[in-house]
Amino acid sequence: MTETMNSNSKTLTSPFEDVCRQWHQSAKNLEVFNELLTRDAKIAQTPKQVIWTLNKAKLYRYTPQVHEDQRHRIPLLLVFAIMNRPYVLDLRPGHSFVEYMVNKGYDVYLLDWGIPGPEDRDLKYDDYVLEYLPRVVRKLKSYTRSNEFSMLGWCLGALISTMYASLRPDDGLKNLILLTAPLDFSDKEAGGFTKWVNHPSFDPDRVVEAFGNVPGEMIDAGAKMLKPVENYVSNYINLWENIEDTSRVEAWHAMNTWVRDIIPMAGAGYRQLITEFYKENRLIEGTLELRGERVDLGRLRANLFNVIAESDHITPPCQSEGVMDLVGSQDKELFRVRGGHIGIMAGRGAEKSTWPQMDAWLGARSD
Amino acid sequence: MSEKPETPNVFDPFGMMKNMRDSNMENWAKAMTEFVNSDSFAAAQAESLNAMLATSTPFRKLLEETLSKSMQALKLPTTDDFVRLAERLTNIEMRLDDMDAKLDQCLESQH
């Protein structure tokens, strides 16, 4: 009799227990979800030290992990864009491009442009390319006692690196890696940005006049609006669906921390980007001048590895491809990767596709 | 071995809803991406930005001028003062960097 009662109560309570368990789990997940959206992940963990500063810019050297005898002779300088933080290159331990390259025996340096203040509103590409970068290169060469170096530029960092490589071909730049480089704006229909800024009603001068430096929020909203559903809806639904998957959640959290860390862009640099590059395509037309010096891509002689993201909606492939026929490099290679603007370097597949390819190309040219 | 094609389980209403949501989301995402890449969106965005700037800029300028005048009246430094100071500091930093470069050259020539 007692046994029958116990078994009945079990069958009665177990559906309620299930509901309660699910409820409890949902509440817990909601708490995690909220925490992920509001707290920063621990990122940029690879050990490093500052070896040079100027204004807001800093040059970091990552602590080598490989014995000097096994290290590549030629140091590698990483140059990221001016409107985002550069630690996307060192996102989190075990999933960091910097850590990967350091472990492969490269002496890695990172240029952080810093966060522009109101006093930097007049900074232009002329300054980045001919004032800051040459000083960084000088420090890098004196610090490493190497007359040669490799440079990796990503996004607008690739634009800056390309102009530098064309204007200062004798500075010792041996290898140049370009990642999703926005260089050729001849196709005015390619990508949302190009369309938006080429519209006759869009006036970058008014933006700069109003704000001084262009607010990070505006740049961030522009980038997200290129794929609104993915960025504003799917991104969070995917997180919710995978909230119990620790490795996915950690990856999402690190990336979201980087995405949320928005910074302004120097006003003059923004105006120049829109007018001289997006609208007038001066670099490719051969009419671009920085501080009175004409930027001639034919003078770029460094070995070139140009990486293109096939699904890039920020820098469509056509904006990077055209440069291959214009540079003077003898050793040049165009490498296409499946993925988006950021995903090819910071996505889950990067360590199996993009990074090993870059290491193979660079390794063969770094000793 | 070839994989069996996924067939929706009709007895799983949530599974069907999930599939519906996924397929709709994909279509929605495509439609929105096409929309933001259109000329009409570019025009609307530029016009709304112009309208926003036209409305807010005079107020912002007025606020900045008032603040600046108040700070001056109180003999406190204004944003412009800090900007000028920061620019001078950057110039000094550049000169120091030039000296650092010359020092490096001297040291190198001694080796």
Image (spheres, coloured by chain):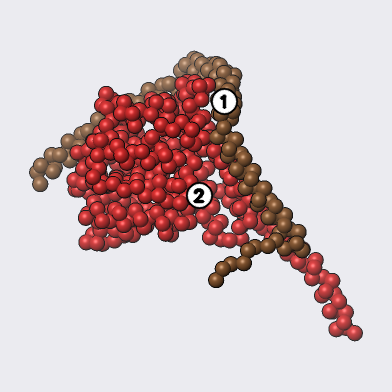
Callout 2: SS = helix
- Please identify the quarter of the rendering in which residue B16 is found: bottom right
Q: Which residue is mark 2?
A: A255
* Residue A27 higher or lower than B90, as above or below: below
Q: Nearer the viewer, residue B109 or A109?
A: A109
Chain letter, colour red in render = A
Image coordinates for residue A226, horizontal then vertical, percent = 54, 38
Callout 1: SS = helix
* Residue B102 higher or lower than A67, as above or below: above
> What amino acid type should be assigned to the residue bearing mark 1?
Ala
Q: Residue furthest right?
A: A1
Q: Separation of disc 2 and disc 1 at Cα?
A: 32 Å
Chain letter, colour brown in render = B
A112 relative to B109 in the view: left or right: right
**Residue at position x 28%, y 46% from top?**
A332
Locate the C terminus of chain A and report the quarter of the image it occupies: bottom left
Mark 2, mark 1: which one is toward the viewer?
1
Image coordinates for residue A341, horizontal then vertical, percent = 46, 45
> What amino acid type should be assigned to the residue bearing mark 2?
Met
Can residue A31 be seen here? The reply is: no
Chain for numbered disc 1: B
Chain for numbered disc 2: A
Locate the N terminus of chain A and report the quarter of the image it occupies: bottom right
A311 relative to B30 in the view: left or right: left
Image coordinates for residue A257, horizontal then vertical, percent = 51, 47
- Please identify the quarter of the rendering in which residue A134 is found: top left
Q: Which residue is mark 1?
A: B43
